[in-house]
Amino acid sequence: MQPKTKLPSKVLRLQEVLDLLSISKSYHFAKLDKNSKSYDPTYPKPISVGERSVRYIEQEVIDWVNARKEERNAS
């Protein structure tokens, strides 16, 4: 018997990520675009769940927000 694969607690659709972070769709994609001034290599990356469908791991989004809070508090 194969061991069970641990799945992330929850995966989010794009709109859920936008709502959670209170950001626009264009800003979201700018954070992912290496050619953008807003690019952030630490920003959560999407995972493909189909030919034209992606999701985001909720915990990665939460961890990214918490890292931003820690940076702010360290200043």
Image (cartoon, grey):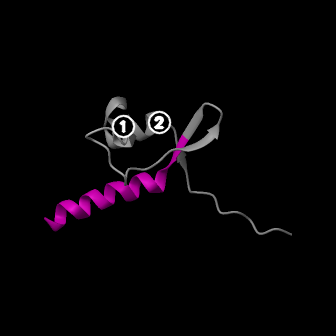
| Front disc: 2 or 1 | 1
Apparent side of residue 2 relative to residue 67 in the rendered image (left or right): right
Farthest residue, direction front: 35
Q: Position of residue 27 (x, y in %)?
A: 31, 34
Apparent side of residue 3 relative to residue 28 in the rendered image (left or right): right
**Sequence order check, earlier mark of 2 and 1:** 2
| Residue type marked 1 | His
Q: Position of residue 72 (x, y in %)?
A: 18, 60
**Residue in view at x 38 percent, y 39 percent:** 33
Answer above or below: position of 60 versus 33. below
**Residue in view at x 36 percent, y 37 percent:** 28
Tell me if label 2 and label 1 are in contact, CB under 8 Å: yes
Farthest residue, direction left: 75
Q: Position of residue 7 (x, y in %)?
A: 63, 58
SS class, disc 2: helix
SS class, disc 1: helix
Q: Position of residue 15 (x, y in %)?
A: 44, 33
Which residue, given by chain and number where applicable, does mark 2 sit on? Answer: 14
Give neighbour class at mark 2: few <14, some 14-19, many 20+ (Cα, 10 Å): some
In the picture, residue 54 is in which quadrant? top right
Q: CA distance from mark 2 to mark 1?
A: 9 Å
Which residue, given by chain and number where applicable, does mark 1 sit on? Answer: 28
| Residue type marked 2 | Leu
User: Where does the magenta region start and end?
Assistant: 55-75
